[in-house]
Amino acid sequence: MFPKGTKRKFSDSGEEPAVSGDEPAPAAAPSAAVRALTSAYSLQRQSLLDMSLIKLQLCHMLVEPNLCRSVLIANTVRQIQEEMTQDGTWQIMTQALAAAQCPTDRLVATEVLCRQTDAAAQAGQSPKPFSVVGLEEGYHAEEVVMEGDVETEVTMSTLSPVSPQLSSASYLAGTFGMGPCWEEDEDDDGECEEDEEEDSEECVSEGEEGDRDHLSADSRTGEQVFGTFEIKHPAPPPDPALEELFSDVDPSYYDLDTVLTGMQSAPKMGPYDLLESLSSHGPTALSSSSSCRSDLNELDHIMEIIVGS
Amino acid sequence: MAGAGGGTSDVQWCFSQVKGAIDDDVAEADIISTVEFNHSGELLATGDKGGRVVIFQQEPESKNQPQCRGEYNVYSTFQSHEPEFDYLKSLEIEEKINKIRWLPQNAAQFLLSTNDKTIKLWKISERDKRPEGYNLKEEDGRYRDLNTVTTLRVPIFRPMDLMVEASPRRVFANAHTYHINSISVNSDCETYLSADDLRINLWNLEITDRSFNIVDIKPANMEELTEVITAAEFHPNQCNTFVYSSSKGTIRLCDMRASALCDKHAKQFEEPEDPNNRSFFSEIISSISDVKFSHSGRYMMTRDYLSVKIWDLNMESRPVETYQVHEYLRSKLCSLYENDCIFDKFECCWNGNDSVVMTGSYNNFFRMFDRVYRQDVTLEASRENSKPRSVLKPRKVSTGGKRKKDEISVDSLDFNKKILHTAWHPLDNIIAVATTNNLYIFQEKLN
């Protein structure tokens, strides 16, 4: 069980909101969405989302996390995201995210979201819009990310039927990826290594996360679990909004890698510097993205050695 | 008639015994994780979080107290599983015993016990004789000086104090990437299945280095994973049939004769969702935590968070019976989600003649549902009701505003005291109910 921490008291009786059929139609976009944002229902829905993201992040690192529980929580998050997308709340959040000024640091998204305390902060707490939902339904935004086009990202709410071919975008893979990554008994094709990268997002669960601001923990969780893992993506685009979208991938990759492989005394300092900085009090500005990329390659190399390929 | 559930109005349950530490400070290793009677009911096995198995044996009925069926006393205790460390993943593998299943009785007793990754076959045998009178050895084992041996004698067996030995006969390892949640022995007594979150494997009891994968629901991309296997069981009579339940509330029945890989189910049991009760927690509470065939093999029972459902194997569209275990929790789902109680996996069991089913709840309550007389009762396993042969008083949770005397309000329930594991003697009205670290044995009051 998780510590209650900052306990929010809210009435359980109003807990089960009605089907999204009661929600205003997306067509009546702005006013309905605003209404949805401020209603008690949406507040409760938001806090449920926050809770779920924290639960996904704080998995027990010593023992393998319960896959059934993770799947159920992830499905709940997905459901909330879908509903928020339908009533337009999601669009508002993505706009708020995109509008925020972000430096090109790695942990930029976390910093940004830490500073937000207004209504947009609510938006900031949610995971990246395209991540979970886009997966099965083939949301247009997925393609958008690949092409580096920021504008269309906002049109998340339009359900375009396009199904992009994503090679290794595994938004939820991290959550469940710990298992399949290490299928030594089974087919050891490239999938194994791919999964490793994807795994990295999940189960980072530094206890240090708990030290952070509640908001940032949520956003970090969201980005960790649901952020894009597109490491195969070419040079990072200079666009600050996209930069922030990719921001949390690498650090968490390192962290998870550290824990997974138990490389407590690896010679490579890059990842561990990262771990140190993360374990201390707040988001630390990192150097340019390129150094992280080279560290990534080093880690890839190390992983290959360990897996014995 | 032995094994008759009777109407719950007729059957009164009495406290018989309680096993385990008395103090409230619960050692983690003592948490009971599984309870199982053997096929005759003479033996009762429990597994705990520390990887130990404790087997109790029923004393033969004494002539002094015909009112009481025999007591259960410790028969054997052994360490079944040890904690392991997966060096590749830097993760511990818990030694907690997830399930124990007895093999049908032979000369010796065999049971399968499993933790998250490894299944072991244990042989429990008795030794009540030992050889004496060796020629070359002294009684204490030292070798005799050959010069002192002048005669030749035949060693003979002499009776000794009963010694119960548990020896591991087979270790079935390295077949599961995910956590094993179920094992089930086939009616052919040659094979058994083991199920983890995404796969089910079929084993031969004699062969440990190989198993057949018969169900695999792992998607090609793990990000598409939305459903896991939660429980699986072989049909009690048809050795080709088994079922497995999922986190989405579906049960699939598979026929192994159809194909080697039973990914295509022969039947799928699922109840349509009630639109009035729809919430964000609908899926979580529909996740099935246990599935058990009836002894007859005609029905199966599933347990989800709030209810127990009985399914007729011939009807896939909906259950034939639904029993609410603790409907008063429906309005508390958000809190239960916050403290993770909503993920508790309750088990359920049938009585010997399939007329009554039982399952656990919170506050050390457990519930019985009589299918014949359409009655249900809530009982409590607690030290307060632990006077020998004291009759258990039915408990009631008050749902409305007014709380009657002797009722307990929903907010007063202790969600740390949960009864997840219960077992019913296959022939008699004797039940074993596990609280966190104690095992309660209740018997039917005999007049």
Image (cartoon, coloured by chain):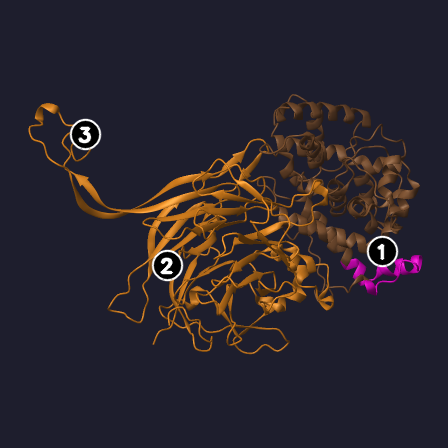
Which element type, helix, strand or loop, lies under badge 3? loop
The structure residue drawn at horizontal position 74% and vertical position 46%, both measured from the top left corner, is: A218
Residue A39 drawn in magenta: yes
The structure residue drawn at horizontal position 73% and vertical position 55%, both measured from the top left corner, is: A48
On the image, the x and y values in percent for residue A234 come to 84, 28
Q: Are marks 3 and 2 in contact (CB under 8 Å)?
A: no
Badge 2 density bin: few <14, some 14–19, many ≥20, Cα 10 Å? few
| Chain B on-screen colour | orange
Q: Quadrant of residue B86?
A: top right
Compute the Cα span from label 3 to label 2.
Answer: 43 Å
Task: Check disc 2 and give the amino acid type.
Answer: Ser
Q: Which contiguous range is marked in magenta?
A: A21-44
Residue at image mark 1: A86
Task: Check disc 1 and give the amino acid type.
Answer: Gln
Compute the Cα span from label 2 to label 1.
Answer: 58 Å
Residue at image mark 3: B142
Q: Which chain is brown?
A: A
Which element type, helix, strand or loop, lies under badge 1? helix
The structure residue drawn at horizontal position 47% and vertical position 57%, both measured from the top left corner, is: B237
Q: Are marks 1 and 3 in contact (CB under 8 Å)?
A: no
Dominant SS of magenta comes to helix
